[in-house]
């Protein structure tokens, strides 16, 4: 019997395997219940994308962006507002996975893990959500984008509130288009919110990162001079400055203000591939940890290691394989404005639920240290210098506020117009905004992207 | 505050209380099972004549020999590794030689078969002489089992009170079903009435006619079966299916009672084993020839309008075939017969296309082989060989899948495994994703009986019932079910320390193991942790044959509990009377 007793412990192994599986199932249920319940075939929530009884969505001023009535979902009365905010609010198709109606479908539809979907109407919580965005600003930015593909984001770098989040191309959620083979070009990438989900070649805006690496790694960078002949052949492929300009002999800060490609190609090689990558990664490149509320922000890419000095030179001026996400670039600017620490952006205002009353804010991520305070202060000076150049040289104005910024004009291919960038922040107690705008095939950054930011911030400031 | 709000609050309160209530019931079933156990004392004592050393005899069957695993170890070269077995039966103590080289002697006479041993008789094994003494003569304390509470603990919940608790749980389910969203009528109440009548009749017969002291296992089975039946009322099968299920439960209870009676004598199984095996193989053979194909598997038999799954009944026979008393366990003939029988069963099931049941049989065979075989090496071999066989079989099936339709179906299900969300509209994941979506739709407390959506998916009452319970009764109740089955397995292992024969130890553990494996394949199959095999959940799935076989399997666990066959009120015999009776201990 003793032997059988010992052998009978085999049943414990079987049972413990069963128990382990049950625990695994329990963990999966807890982790994934929101995804599992949100299925188009779910009979409990099948009407109007599960939003037939969903709560209202408000902007920061209390304007209703979406609401439900008699099992149908309705949006703002104004078509421009609907189109400008499509990627923030979403539609019933739930195709825009980062939109609030997709991400927060369950809290909108009143599903909760305790009592499931079967909440009697009389006891159903209203499920309303209030967003941080300003619909006037979004509308202004959308209009200023003027039909170009692109993105515009403005957020408060002191609090993290996202005020403007516009992505184009877009469509009217109240009148969803049928996308066919004929019109699919027009709607290319329409389900992506370019602000959070896309990355673009950064061009000269990447010089902020190269400059930070130079400040940290080349002690005598300020006493050095760089001579620009309009083009540079030293590393292989010819690097030219924009518009055939010749900058002559210039200091580091002049080179930044001039956005001199020849100087920065040289600086990138002075820094070295490892150091430049290290700085870029500290500033959040190659990382997908950033979130806007719970919405994941696409990973920006930088890596030129082991590919020689030509690749390093191009990567230092934001070409090569560099890719940057607009919101991530705005976060870098917020770090410059805040003395090195980037504020994490958020989209959902406090809902006043129990956790928030206890001081646990689930919608706000912590801040991210991206550079030392001294580097930040040096970058502030550089970006202010660049901004003065734009203001006096090109008449750029951002709602009449003081600002620090950098433009970019990224080459994306021989037969395509360049991608325009404008990133930076305003220096104003009442209006502390970090911003980034991208206009695909927009031409020169200083011409195409600056009006978008001006429009968005003007709508906020006045 | 309208009436609607009051009603809504009441319905939510009921839904929140039900899971807590279910937890209390399952807890009480096992809390009760842990009590009423006789204190740890040796049954008899063996005294070595030469040295006066006392050896406690703890089990009803004890192996004596030179090997390490023997219960009573004699390190003497003239003793065989497995020499003889000292066993207790209703009639008294016996010693049975199991093929030793030099034989076993009682009072100097060489034994043949089972030889009775009285108090103060001398058993000679090799050069050692043992004298049989009373258990009381052993003075040292023995370590109690962790599972059972101490004998002095306060009394547990009376069985009838447990039954009242369970009845009310089913009543609440019936009330909920009466007010379901789609249909409001009193039919669930009628099903409830019929079902409870049968359960209480079973309870009365068990406690008063059969004089059984304990009722926890039956109560647990009643709770689970009733939960399943009350769920059925509002599913696609409607009240008809619930009534069929109730009738099956009644049949199951009868099978249970007959089996418990039949198993009272562990040696009876030995005489019947061969016939049971032949009968089972014949049944599967008839099934193969006259079977009806349902859902891709040819495992149904229709006789006079009643269709059944013979493979479910063969499960009971399978447990029978695997277990034996200690002195007959390790004979070669016994073992070869069992292995051949298992192989025939698994083969028949594979030909039928019932891979789920084949897998259950296969796993149970490994468990049984591990428990019953002699030394460690044979056990290891017996576990490894079939696994190698199974792996090559899987490779063969995948290879054949291109040629044979039935195997192609299996392969398509396998391909969806771990990728079910990419197969929401085809065979690879249609059922699994719906189970997962709907099981969380109900949240912790469920959407209420009859308000689920999973019922519109085919085979939901049988193959997907776990998801259905999770949706309608909530995740808490759903998770209580595996918890109860896990507790049942631990209970089966714990009672085997006191089983009256190795037959019970093996059969109880294997029956519990079979239930665990089946639950595992069911729950993990539909939630994409394992590939979907389409097996039923014990006691809860729709299916008469399955219900009957589960009650039958439970009988093995019941029989293994030493307390089962104890008379209700045992008259206290004077100590001296025992001594005079000699054999009657």
Image (spheres, coloured by chain):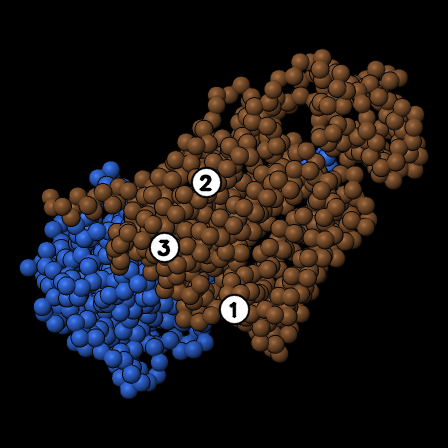
Residue B21 seen in this snapshot: yes
Secondary structure at numbered mark 2: helix
How far from the left and from the top, in percent, is residue A268? 40, 64
Rendered hue of chain A is: blue
How far from the left and from the top, in percent, is residue B510? 63, 46
Q: Give the residue pinned by disc 2.
A: B201
Count every numbered label the image shows and give the total: 3
State whether residue B161 is above or below residue B197. Answer: above
The residue lying at 92 percent from left, 28 percent from top is B109
Question: B229 or B441: nearer the eye?
Answer: B229
State whether residue A432 is above or below residue A5. Answer: below
The residue lying at 27 percent from left, 49 percent from top is A364
> Mark 2 or mark 1, which is nearer to you?
2
Name the chain under label 3.
B
The residue lying at 79 percent from left, 39 percent from top is B327
Chain-order first, disc 2 or disc 1: 2
Tag 2: Cα neighbours inside 10 Å, few (<14), some, or many (≥20)?
few
Q: In which quadrant is the C terminus of chain B drawn? A: top right
Rendered hue of chain B is: brown
Residue A66 seen in this snapshot: no
Name the chain under label 1.
B
User: For this view, does A266 lie left or right of residue A167?
Assistant: right
The residue lying at 33 percent from left, 60 percent from top is B453
Q: Give the residue pinned by disc 3.
A: B233
Give residue B196's mark. Answer: none
Chain-order first, disc 3 or disc 2: 2
Tag 3: Cα neighbours inside 10 Å, few (<14), some, or many (≥20)?
many
How far from the left and from the top, in percent, is residue B25? 42, 37
State whether residue B44 is above or below residue B192. Answer: above
Secondary structure at numbered mark 3: loop
Q: Give the residue pinned by disc 1.
A: B294
Tag 1: Cα neighbours inside 10 Å, few (<14), some, or many (≥20)?
few
């Amino acid at each position: 019997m003793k032997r059988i007793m010992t052998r009978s412990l085999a049943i414990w192994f079987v049972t413990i395997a069963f128990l382990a599986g049950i625990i695994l199932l329990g963990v999966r249920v807890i982790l994934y219940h929101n995804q599992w319940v949100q299925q188009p075939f779910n009979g409990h929530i099948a009407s109007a994308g599960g939003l037939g009884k969903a709560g209202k969505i408000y902007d920061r001023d209390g304007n209703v962006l979406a609401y439900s009535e008699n099992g149908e979902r309705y949006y703002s009365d104004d078509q421009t507002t609907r189109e400008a905010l499509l990627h923030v609010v979403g539609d019933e198709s739930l195709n825009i996975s980062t939109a609030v109606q997709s991400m927060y479908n369950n809290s909108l539809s009143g599903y909760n893990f305790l009592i499931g979907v079967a909440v009697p109407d009389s006891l159903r919580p209203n499920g309303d959500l209030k967003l941080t965005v300003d619909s006037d600003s979004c509308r202004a930015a959308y209009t200023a984008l003027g039909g170009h593909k692109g993105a515009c984001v403005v957020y408060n770098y002191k609090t993290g509130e996202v005020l403007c989040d516009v992505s184009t191309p877009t469509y009217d959620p109240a009148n969803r288009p049928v996308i066919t083979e004929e019109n699919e070009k027009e709607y290319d990438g329409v389900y992506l919110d370019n602000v959070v989900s896309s990355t673009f070649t950064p061009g000269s805006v990447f010089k902020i990162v190269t400059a930070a690496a130079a400040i940290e790694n080349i002690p005598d960078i300020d006493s050095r001079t760089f001579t620009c002949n309009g083009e540079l052949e030293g590393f292989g492929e010819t690097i030219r400055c924009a518009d055939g300009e010749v900058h002559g002999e210039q200091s580091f800060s002049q080179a930044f203000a001039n956005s001199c490609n020849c100087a920065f190609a040289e600086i990138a090689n002075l820094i070295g591939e490892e150091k430049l990558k290290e700085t870029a990664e500290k500033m959040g490149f190659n990382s997908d940890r950033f979130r806007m509320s719970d919405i994941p922000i696409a990973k920006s890419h930088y890596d030129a290691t082991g590919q020689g000095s030509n690749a390093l030179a191009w990567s230092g001026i934001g070409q090569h394989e560099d890719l940057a996400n607009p919101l991530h670039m705005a976060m870098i600017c917020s770090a410059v404005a805040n003395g090195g620490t980037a504020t994490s952006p958020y989209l959902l205002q406090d809902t006043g639920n129990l956790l928030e009353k206890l001081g646990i804010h689930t919608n706000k991520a912590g801040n991210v240290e991206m550079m030392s305070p001294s580097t930040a202060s040096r970058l502030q000076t550089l970006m202010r210098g660049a901004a003065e150049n734009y203001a006096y040289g090109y008449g750029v104005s951002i709602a009449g506020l003081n600002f620090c910024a950098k433009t970019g004009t990224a080459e994306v291919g021989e037969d395509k117009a360049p991608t325009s960038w404008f990133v930076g922040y305003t220096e104003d107690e009442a209006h502390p905004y970090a911003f980034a705008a991208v206009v695909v095939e927009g031409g020169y950054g200083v011409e195409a992207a600056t009006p978008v930011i001006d429009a968005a911030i003007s709508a906020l400031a006045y | 505050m309208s009436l609607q709000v009051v009603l809504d609050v009441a319905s939510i309160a009921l839904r929140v209380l039900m899971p807590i209530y279910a937890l209390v019931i399952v807890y009480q079933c096992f809390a009760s099972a842990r009590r009423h156990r006789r204190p740890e004392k040796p049954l008899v004592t063996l005294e070595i004549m030469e040295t006066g050393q006392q050896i406690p005899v703890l089990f009803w069957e004890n192996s004596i020999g030179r090997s390490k695993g023997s219960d009573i170890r004699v390190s003497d070269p003239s003793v065989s590794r497995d020499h003889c077995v000292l066993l207790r039966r209703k009639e008294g103590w016996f010693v049975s030689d199991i093929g030793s080289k030099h034989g076993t002697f009682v009072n100097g006479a060489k034994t043949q078969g089972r030889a009775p041993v009285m108090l103060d008789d001398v058993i000679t094994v090799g050069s050692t002489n043992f004298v049989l003494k009373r258990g009381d003569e052993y003075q040292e304390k023995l370590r109690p089992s962790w599972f059972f509470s101490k004998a002095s603990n306060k009394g547990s919940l009376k069985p009838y009170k447990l039954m009242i608790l369970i009845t009310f749980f089913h009543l609440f389910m019936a009330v909920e079903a009466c007010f379901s969203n789609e249909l409001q009528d009193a039919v669930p109440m009628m099903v409830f009435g019929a079902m409870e009548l049968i359960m209480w009749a079973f309870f009365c017969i068990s406690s008063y006619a059969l004089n059984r002291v304990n009722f926890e296992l039956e109560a647990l089975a009643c709770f689970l079966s009733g939960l399943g039946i009350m769920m059925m009322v509002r599913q696609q099968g409607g009240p008809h299916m619930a009534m069929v299920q109730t009738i099956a439960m009644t049949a199951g209870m009868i099978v249970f009672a007959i089996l418990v009676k039949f198993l009272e004598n562990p040696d009876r199984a030995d005489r019947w084993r061969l016939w049971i095996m032949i009968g089972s193989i014949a049944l599967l053979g008839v099934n193969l020839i006259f079977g009806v194909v349902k859902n891709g598997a040819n495992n149904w038999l229709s006789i006079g309008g009643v269709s059944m799954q013979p493979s479910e009944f063969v499960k009971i026979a399978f447990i029978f075939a695997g277990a034996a008393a200690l002195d007959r366990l390790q004979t070669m003939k016994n073992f070869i017969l069992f292995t051949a029988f298992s192989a025939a069963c698994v083969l028949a099931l594979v030909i039928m296309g019932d891979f789920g049941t084949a897998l259950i049989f296969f796993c149970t065979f490994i468990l049984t082989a591990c428990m019953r075989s002699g030394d460690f090496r044979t056990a290891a071999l017996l576990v490894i060989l079939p696994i190698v066989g199974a792996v090559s079989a899987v490779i063969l099936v995948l290879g054949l899948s291109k040629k044979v339709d039935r195997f192609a179906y299996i392969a398509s299900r396998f391909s969806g495994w771990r990728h079910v969300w990419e197969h929401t509209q085809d065979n690879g994941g249609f059922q699994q994703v719906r189970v997962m979506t709907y099981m969380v739709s109900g949240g912790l407390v469920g959407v209420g009986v009859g308000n689920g959506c999973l019922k519109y998916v085919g085979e939901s009452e049988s193959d997907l019932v776990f998801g259905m319970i999770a949706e309608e009764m909530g995740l808490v109740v759903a998770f209580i079910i595996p918890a109860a089955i896990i507790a049942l397995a631990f209970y089966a292992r714990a009672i085997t320390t006191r089983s009256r024969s190795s037959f019970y130890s093996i059969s109880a553990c294997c029956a519990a193991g079979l239930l665990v494996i089946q639950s595992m394949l069911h729950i993990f199959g539909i939630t994409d942790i394992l590939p979907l095999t389409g097996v039923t959940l014990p006691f809860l799935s729709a299916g008469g044959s399955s219900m009957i076989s589960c009650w039958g399997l439970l009988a093995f666990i019941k029989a293994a509990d030493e307390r089962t066959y104890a008379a209700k009120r045992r008259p206290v015999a004077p100590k001296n009377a025992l001594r005079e009776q000699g054999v009657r201990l």
